[in-house]
Image (spheres, rainbow, N blue to C red):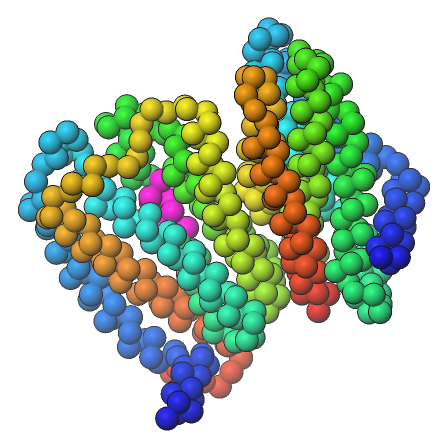
Amino acid sequence: MNALLATVRRDLLLALRRKSEVLTSLFFFVIVASLFPLGIGPEPALLKKIAPGVLWVAALLSTLLGLPRLFAADHLDGTLEQMALSPSPLALLIAGKILAHWLLCGLPLVLLAPLLGLQFALEGQTLFILSLSLLLGTPLLSLIGAMGAALTLGVRGGGVLLALLVLPLYIPTLIFGAGAVEAQSAGLGVEGHLSLLAALLALAVFFAPWATTAALRIALE
Amino acid sequence: MTNMNLINWFRFASPQSFYPLAGKLVPLFWTLALLFGAAGLWVSFFVAPTDAQQGEGYRIIFVHVPASWMSMIIYLAMAFWAGLGLALNTRLSSMMAQALAPTGALMAALSLWTGAFWGKPMWGAWWVWDARLTSELILFFLYVGFIALQSAIDDPRRADKAGAILALIGVVNVPIIYFSVKWWNTLHQGSTINLTRAPSMAHTMLWGMLLMALAFWMYSIAVSLMRLRAIMLERERHTEWVKHALE
C-alpha cells in the first residue's frame, strides 16, 4: 500500500513541477465544450438536449489527450524498468500511476463540468448528476486508457493508434455516463445508469491494472 | 495412446511442418467454398421463393447473415489463437491470429455494407442506430485497432503479444459493448424498426442461408491459410526450411 501511495505522490509532485501539461488537457476540455454552442446555435432547449453527450465526449477526448504521457517519460528515463525490478508488485505501482493520472486528468474534469453545464443551460439536480456520473466514469476512462497507453508504449504513431484502440472501448462508459445525465433531464430514474457505471468501474479496477502490467512487461522486454 | 496424440498435435504447431499441410489444405477448402457457394447461390436466387413482404430485395440476406456470423466467429477464433500464443508462446498460434484479422475485418465491413443495401429498400434508410448495426460497427473498429497495432510494431514477437492482449481485452468488452448499445437503443426508442425477422422462414431460404454460411466458412479458412502461409514465409525467411520450401 505504501508503494502505491509513494507512486501517487511522486507522480503528483512531478506534475506540479510541470503544470502546463495538466492544464493543457483541462483547457482542451473547456474549449471543445465551448465550441459546440458556437457551431450549433445558442438556443437553450437545444443546448440542454445535447449537453450530456457533448460534455461527456469532451471529457473522453481530453482524458485521451493525457494518456500518451502516462508511461512515456518513465519509459524513456528507465524508471519503468526499475519499477519492474522493485520488490513491490508492479501491478500495484501501476495502479498508483493510474490513480495519479485520474487525480490530475479526471478529477479536475469532474469539478469543472458543472461550470460548463451552466453554459449549456443545465439545472441544479442535473448538474449534480453530471458530476456524479463523471466521478464514476472518469476513473474508468483512466483505467481503460492505461491499457491502451501500455500497449502503444514506444510504438510508431503511438498517439493516433492509442485513440483508435481506446475509443471503441470507451463506448459503454459514454453510453451509461451520458445516459444518466439525459435520464435526469428527462425526469427518469438515474440509479440504473449509475449502478452499471459503478459495476464497470469495479470490474476495471480489478482487471485493468493487471492487463496494463502485462502489456508493460511486453514493452519492456 | 494419448501421448501419441499429443505428439501428433504439436508436430503441426511448428511452421515448418504446417506449411506443406496448409498448402495441401488450401485447394481443398477453395473447392469446397466454390461448391457450397455455387449451390448456395443457386438455392438463394432460383429456388428460394420471393418473400411476401420484402419482395426480391430480401435476397441480400444470403450474403449478409453469413458475413455477420463470420465476423463474430472470426473474432473469437482470433482471440483464441492470440491467447494461446500468449499462454504457450507458440509462434504458429500468433501467426494464425494475425492471418485471421483481415478476413474478419472484411466480413464485418461486408456485413455493414450489405446491411445498408438491405436497409435502404426495407426501412428507407441506409443506416439506423440499431443495436446490432452499432455493435457490428464497433466490432469493425476493434478489428481495425488490432491490425493497426500489429502493423505499428516492428518486432513481430512484441507485435504478437501486444495484439494478443488487445484481442483478449476486446473479447471481454464485446458482450459489454453489445449490451450497453442494446440498452442505449431501447432507452432512446430511436428506430421503430426491429431487425428480428419472423421466425417462420421458408425451408429453402434456410437452406440457402446455411449453404452460403458454409461457403463463407470455407472461403475464410482457405484465405486465412493462404495468408498464414505468406506470414510463415515472411517471418521464417532466415531459416533453412523456407529456402527449401521456395525451391
- Left or right of residue A114, residue B217 in this image: left
The rendered magenta stretch, by its main secondary structure, is classed as: helix
Measured from the top left, where is residue A45 in percent x and y?
58, 8
Q: Which residue lies at the image location 11% right of the left edge and 31% below the top edge?
A: B52
Q: Is residue A157 visible?
A: no
Residue B186 in view of the camera? yes
Q: Can you tell which quarter of the image residue B154 is in? A: bottom right
Is A119 inside the magenta-drawn segment? Answer: no
Q: Quadrant location of residue A121?
A: top right
Q: Is residue B67 above or below residue A37?
A: below
In the image: residue A108, left or right of residue A50:
right
Q: Residue at x 40, y 83 (%)?
A: B9
Drawn side of residue A162 relative to residue B133, left or right: right
Query: Percent position (x, y) of residue A128?
Result: 71, 22
Residue A60 image point, x, y percent = 65, 34
Percent from the top left, x then y, of residue A56?
63, 29
Q: Find out whether residue B111 is within the magenta segment.
A: yes
Q: Which residue is painted at 39% across and 78% down in the image?
A: B19
Which of the two residues, B240 or B195, is positioned nearer the viewer here?
B195
Identify the residue at image location x=20%, y=54%: B210
Quarter where residue A21 is shown: top right
Image quadrant in which the C terminus of chain A is located: bottom right
What range is drawn magenta here?
Answer: B105-112
